[in-house]
Every structure is written in C-alpha cells, then in structure tokens.
Amino acid sequence: MKFWKKAFVIAGSALTLGLLAACGGGGNDTVDTPPVDVVDTNNNQDGQTDAPPVAEGVVVYRRTGSSIPSLAPHNHTFDPVRVALTYSQGSFFYHLLDPETNSLRWFPGFAAELPEYNDEMTVWTIRLREDLAFTNGTPINAHTYDYSWMMLLDPVLASPGAQVFFNVFNVVGARAYFLGLSMEDYMAIQAQDSPNWVDNLPATDNPATWADVGIDILDDYTIQFTLHTPTREIDVLQTFGAMAALAAVDPEMYEAAFNADRTVNTYGLELADLAQSGRFIIVDWARDQYRVFERNMNHPLAHMFTWDVIEEFVIPDPGTVMQMFLNGELDQMALNSTTFPQFREDPRTVRVEGPVVWGFHINSASETNPILRDADFRHALFHATDRVTIAFDIYQVFIPANYIVSSRAWVGDLVNNPVRFRDTPQGRANQGANYSFDPDRALELFNAAWERNGSVPVAMELQYFEGSLEQRLASEFMKEEFEALFGADRFELVLTSMPVTASYERMQAGLHDAGWGTEGQNSWNAWSSFDIWRYDRPLRLHQMNSPEFMELQTRSAQGDLVFDDAGRIDALGRMEAIVLEYMPWIPIYQNNTAIIYSDRVHLLLEEFLFPVGHAVHQSFIEPNVERSITVNP
C-alpha cells in the first residue's frame, strides 16, 4: 500500500509564513486593493486544488466527543454543538492547508470566489456557486440565506446566534430588527461612544422591518452586506468561514418546525428535523452514545478531506477511552493526568497550543450570597489560587494562566509582522508575579470582605463538570487550600458535580455561586471575543457593567481602532485589565493539550500550525476493514 508520506513539516521561518498566509488581508491598511495573501494562488476561481492521494477502501476515523443536546443552528450556546454544525453545514469559505504550496489558504466553499468590497470596506459582496443543495435535494441560493438570516434575527425567537451580525460584522439595521427598535432610535444608540443595548431601550410603534436590514439579494446567487463601520477582510472570511449560526436552513422544514403562534421553533432538535449541506453529514445520532458522519461528496471541497466516515463516541470514563485506544478502537486520544505520563515520550504524541483560558465564573450579583458581590472577596480567591499546582501537577498538560487572553492571540500587523499579545508590554503588564498566587494578599483581602459582610461564616458552592476527573481533583485541591488559608470556621467551599449543559444553564440563569467554564476566543481577533464581557451580551455569565470597557470593545471591534494596530493593542490590554479588576471570573489555566494518534494516522503536519493544527482532516489515514457502528438506512 502506498502511504501519504509525512512531507510537510513547517517550522521556524516557514511557520511564520504559514501564519502570515492565515491572516488573509487582516492588517492591510491599503483598503482599495484585495490582499494577495488570501487569493487562490492556483488561479482556479472555483477554489479547487489537486485531490490528495485516495486510499483504498473506506477511511473510518474514530474518536470521542461530548454529548450534545441538539443541532439547532440558531439556538446553540454549547461549543460542541457549534463544532458539529460546522461539519454538517456548508460555509462560504474554508481555511485549509494547500499541500501544493505548504501554506494556508482561504478556499471558496459555498462561495464562488473570495468576497469583493468597496473602497471604504463597508459594503461586501459574496457570490454563491450555482449548484448548491441540501442533501435532501432542496436547492440553496441567495434567497435561502435571506430567509435563514431573517429567522436568525427574528425578534420573537430571540436566537443567541444573532449576535454574529452585531459584533465585528455589524450589519446596518440588524440589531434594530432583532430588538424591535425604530431605525431612528437604533441609529441614535449606535452613535453613542459606549452603546448599551440592554437598559432603557425605547418603545416604538414603528419597529425596523427586514427591508431596513443591510442584507440585500442582488440576484439568485449574489448577496450584498452594508456595514456600519469598515471591517478587515480576515474578519469577513472568518465570519463566513465556520458557519454554524449563519448556516442555511431549509425554509420548508423550518416553517414546519414552528408552533402555532410562531414563538418556538424546533428545527434541528432531532436529526430528522435538520437539513444538512456540509463537508460531512450526520447520518446517525444517539445523544449520549455516539454520532456518525459521512463525507458529503457533493460538497465543493469534498476532495480536500481524507475521511470518509467519522465515528464519534461519547465516553465519559477516561479508563474506557484509554482501553479503546490501546485496543485499536479509537484513532486519537486526548491525554490527561493519568495517561500523559505513560505516553509523554511516545513519538505519536503531539502538542497542541490551547486557544482559551479556563477558570470559574462567580455570580457577582448574587441575591442569596452577598459576599460574592464584594470585589475584595473575588480578588482573594484570585490570589489564593495555586495555578502552578493545578496546571502542572493535577492536569499536567496545561499551563498556568492568570490572564484572560490566551497566548495564541495574535495582534499588530497581522499580515507582515504578527506578534503574540502576551509578548507585548500591554500583555505582560496584566500578568503578576508567580501567576498571581499570593496567599498573604489573599488573606488580607478576605479579611476585609469578611468583616464588611458581618464577620459570619460564609460558604460558596463551586460547580464542576460531571465526569471530569481533573476538574474534580482541582476543585478538591482548592477546597482544601482555601479553607486552610481563610479558616474552615469562616469559609467553606461546597463542591457540586453536574453535567456540562446543566451547569451552563444554571449559570446563565444566575442560580450559581461559582462554576467552572471558559469562553471562546478568536485568535486573530481577540477584540471581537471580548464581547462576552459586555453588559449587553445575550446569555452572559457575568454582571460586569463598565462603560469604559463597552466603549473600548466597540471601538476596537467595529469602530475607529479597527485599522489602528497600536491603538488596538492598547485597547486589548486595558480591556483585559478592566475584567481582572472587576474579577467576574477567576482564570486558572490555559488548555494546552497533548494528543496521541493511532498508527493508522499519518499526519500531514508534524508541527502544530494554527489554525489547522496538524491538518488531520487532510492527512492520510489507513483504511479500516469495517465500521464500528452499523447505521440503519
């Protein structure tokens, strides 16, 4: 058998070139010329490249994954749902490794070509391919997306995914339509330095209509967007590069999923109620057991992926996962505290730089536990946390983090000279000595908060995820450390295990004291990711309300700082400082991970390359003899 040789090792200067290519036109201030870094260098306007070698037999890739509650494109708030949707729903653009040039490229997917824009970069035009369809045969065209986004922004449905059109890609009138505002009131709020889209919104008898929204269908295959403020090309490509909330829905199926008064829509809650169009199609789904994907050969870029079938098992027990991997029943395994020592030196083990920081949220507006509202108490927990022990001794593969923005966030001139934010003076200024572990300072702050709150014993409940051994061990470690430091007669940390989705739902409802969690981060646009800390963010997990923060986030994500590289770095540093000053969330570690692959997997990239990692989707996988799961037709 002829194997696909591991021929693409990108390191040193070659890695830098790959990163620059990944930026697209992100930092190009010459706005009237399309950046060359995102142009298809094969001069093939449909985005096609030569197909990789085809393996003999069916390539079945087997791995583990989280249980997901639904596949509703407009209503997901759980990241594993988003990931499943980016597989099963088509995107306009795809960021992939081009094996011919050993570099990253943006390839048109459902789009016929890369986007066009006016000189001001406020009007963007995307042309679609003319042969698109859902796997049920329903055609997909510009009108399909017009309907899909009208439903996404429906003010009655109040879909959480609607915020995609409010942040970096700030479409004229989209928020007015979503909130039921008149265009006059909407424009007045939008013109404020720090617009607040939650408090004291004016009532109106003349709400914006869909015709007021800056999404125009020029013909059956051409969509034009009008934005409030200029945006970078890289941000447009990313907005339409992993489409989950923005995915097309089948209009007929979506209409059939409404209840009588159109206040609830069940599209995607069950597999039979979801139309799919992505590079992989979910053909079987048992919620708490497994998912099976099959490659969609009608997808425009199907030839660029090497997997025919993905079998994704939901297995909460780490011991079972390891035994399946050793038995050859899984093709990859994320290493944890129990498996990392065993496989640390295995040549099949690779390291992955994590995109996010993990910690625990604190309910700073708690009505039942008033000490949580005291900033000194929250800072006491921050300084009492021994991050080194948690990251290196308990998790082993992670790194300590006393910051918000991960080390994978790039800033500056993203085309010619990107730098890591954590390496800038602004980033370093927010990192205290010893990862901010300072028991003396923690005790001082706790004493002050405790006295202000009546000098009576206090307790705080900490939610951790059911089935996570390391999270339980870290929680137990913090309980022991905090109670010893503050005094067990004065403070008790009560530990509660619950499923991931239940934990997040409880935090969104404000029914928690504290709970483990993280928030997604865009490594090329940390400013947009900081909208999670806005007071007007839907389903936010915090109660921080800083006008200064709101103004800086607006200016750096969609305002006058978008093309000011130095000003943007300053803004990011100050925004991170504001969050750390308020302390709605205690950062603890960055989820750098290690993964071991089976002998069947021949990675295309031996070194990690953001954002494609080791390009495992495009790597050669030795064919399986048979599937593990029988899919009923």
Image (cartoon, rainbow, N blue to C red):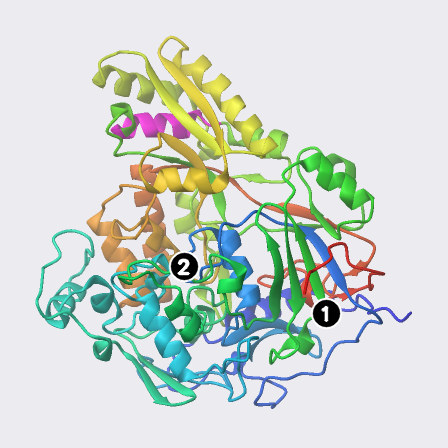
Which of the labelled discs sits on residue 266, or is there none? 2
Q: Quadrant of residue 48?
A: bottom right
Is 613 included in the stretch rendered in magenta?
Answer: no
Q: Position of residue 125 (x, y in %)?
A: 38, 85
Q: Which residue is mark 1?
A: 306
Query: Quick one: 145 or 401, which is closer to the camera?
Result: 145
The stretch of residues the image draws in magenta is 373-385
Q: Mark 1 falls on what kind of element?
A: loop
303 relative to 582 in the view: left or right? right
Is 379 included in the stretch rendered in magenta?
Answer: yes
Residue most extreme to the front: 260
Q: Position of residue 202 (x, y in %)?
A: 9, 59
Residue most extreme to the right: 1
Closer to the chain start, of discs 2 and 1, is 2
Q: Mark 2 falls on what kind of element?
A: loop
Mark 2 residue crowding within 10 angstroms, few (<14) / some (14–19) / many (20+): some
Residue at the spot 26% in from the left edge and 51% down from the top edge? 549
Tell me the chief SS of the magenta region.
helix
Q: Amino acid at mark 2?
A: Thr
Query: Quick one: 255 or 419, which is closer to the camera?
Result: 255
Q: Amino acid at mark 1?
A: Thr
Judge whether 48 appears above or below 287 on screen.
Answer: below
Q: Quadrant of residue 334?
A: top right
Q: How far apart are the two marked residues, 2 and 1, measured between alpha carbons?
A: 33 Å
Judge whether 408 appears above or below 150 on screen.
Answer: above
Q: Position of residue 142 (x, y in %)?
A: 41, 83
Residue at the spot 39% in from the left edge and 64% down from the top edge? 257
